[in-house]
Amino acid sequence: AQKVTQAQTEISVVEKEDVTLDCVYETRDTTYYLFWYKQPPSGELVFLIRRNSFDEQNEISGRYSWNFQKSTSSFNFTITASQVVDSAVYFCALSEAYRGSTLGRLYFGRGTQLTVWP
Amino acid sequence: GAVVSQHPSRVICKSGTSVKIECRSLDFQATTMFWYRQFPKQSLMLMATSNEGSKATYEQGVEKDKFLINHASLTLSTLTVTSAHPEDSSFYICSARNLEAFFGQGTRLTVV
């Protein structure tokens, strides 16, 4: 069965601090996809990144970076020099793969509420 | 990126009435759409998988007679909450699959 665990329910930091959001997943599939989404107070889900199970390269996009470690089944997300606008709920999610693409059904973690104080 | 439009974004209805929520893929054809429900400060839970031209597949515990899903075309799926009760108040969000999963903006339903 698929399962995503985000152990951190809430994190508070002060602006300009770095913060890492943890994500641990469980799956028996050898091919799968991992995602991070941001959900601001308005409610919509903002796609941040997709990573497939064969690509363990870390990725950096501006102040965001992701660390994928298959050995520990983790896909952690780091925000460098956090800003107030980063305040949101962040969800990690896992998707089964089907014929090389995402199946689309996502298994979500419980989310981490990040609050960045000025 | 692809766009999924969900309407309405907010709706308030009286107990006992029905509410229809639309989910449209604007620039791609989605053979499969997903409906999720999110309770306050909680994760998204899959309610059902909607396939174009066939009956939806509901997750365990989701009442199919209460949450009617219709996926009549490759670009439109609808969720109708029938005989709504206050406990149906929630945030409903749809997702359409192409090669990626794209999400609508969500619908906040309040039943009074």
Image (cartoon, rainbow, N blue to C red):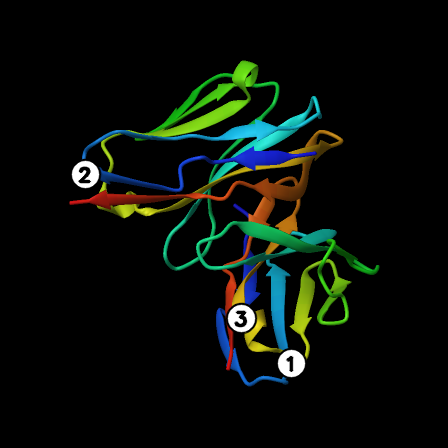
Q: Is residue A57 visible?
A: yes
Do tags 1 and 2 sit on the same chain? no
| Disc sitting over residue B89 in the figure | 3
Type of amino acid at the residue the image marks with label 1: Ser
Do tags 3 and 1 sit on the same chain? yes
Q: Secondary structure at mark 3?
A: loop
Estimate the spatial distance between the alpha carbons at disc 3 and disc 2, rounded to whole Å. 34 Å
Estimate the spatial distance between the alpha carbons at disc 3 and disc 1, rounded to whole Å. 12 Å
Determine whether, in the image, residue B88 is placed left or right of residue B50.
left
Residue most toward the right?
Answer: B54
Q: Quadrant of residue B27?
A: bottom right
Name the residue: 62% across, 78% down.
B84
**Which residue was labeled with disc 2?**
A14
Within-10-Å neighbours for mark 2: few <14, some 14–19, many 20+: some
Mark 3 vs mark 1: in front: 3
Within-10-Å neighbours for mark 3: few <14, some 14–19, many 20+: many
Determine whether, in the image, residue A81 is placed left or right of residue A79.
left
| Disc sitting over residue A112 in the figure | none
**Which residue was labeled with disc 1?**
B18
Name the residue: 22% across, 31% down.
A81
Looking at the picture, how far across and down is residue A36, in whole percent?
A: 48, 37
